[in-house]
Image: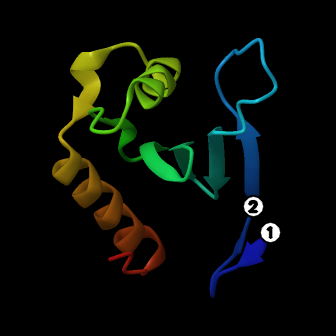
Amino acid sequence: MFTTAQTPVEIKIRNYGNYSSDNYGSCREVQIGRLVLFFSYETVVAFSTPKTGLIICKNVWSKTTGRHLNCISSDKSRRREYDEFQQLLQQYVIDEYGLDVT
């Protein structure tokens, strides 16, 4: 847990997806307060907030990341172009936490 100027913020980390192997530490979900970040390896590929709902990036990486994205949501109509995804995530972090992540 860490504290902002206003309130304590809880941090939770877990794996997502239902894999038969324990070797899927590459599928991490990190919750920081009301922001949930979904990672494929070390890359944020989706996020969710009460304000935005689930935002998912289109796959610009690999087949494995594509499988990770499908674990988050198989609905490909929900996916955003990479630049738009980055912009939405950055804007939320600036608005919510006052942090510039560029």
Q: Earlier in the sequence, mark 2 or mark 1?
A: 1
Q: Which residue is mark 2?
A: 10
Where does the image place residue 27, in percent across and percent down from the top left?
Answer: 62, 35
Q: Is residue 52 above or below residue 1?
A: above
Q: Nearer the viewer, residue 1 or 21?
A: 21
Q: Residues within 10 Å of mark 2 (few under 14, many from 20)?
A: few
- Which residue is at a point 51% across and 26% down the rendered structure image? 68
Helix, strand or loop status at disc 2: loop
Query: With 12 as the anchor, is 30 left or right in this view?
Result: left
Work out whether residue 89 can be spotted: yes
- Which residue is at a point 55% across and 53% down the rendered structure image? 42
Query: How many angstroms separate mark 2 from mark 1 (CA)?
Result: 5 Å
Examine the image and state in which quarter residue 90 appears.
bottom left
Q: Which residue is mark 1?
A: 1
Q: Is residue 24 above or below residue 90?
A: above
Query: With 21 as the anchor, is 17 left or right in this view?
Result: left
Query: With 52 as the anchor, is 10 left or right in this view?
Result: right
Amino acid tagged 1: Met
- Which residue is at a point 45% across and 18% down the rendered structure image? 70
Q: Quadrant of the C terminus?
A: bottom left
Q: Is residue 66 above or below residue 11?
A: above
Where does the image place residue 88, in percent across and percent down from the top left?
Answer: 27, 55
Q: Nearer the viewer, residue 102 or 47?
A: 102
Q: Quadrant of the N terminus?
A: bottom right
Work out whether residue 50 can be spotted: no
Amino acid tagged 2: Glu
Query: With 75 as the anchor, is 82 left or right in this view?
Result: left
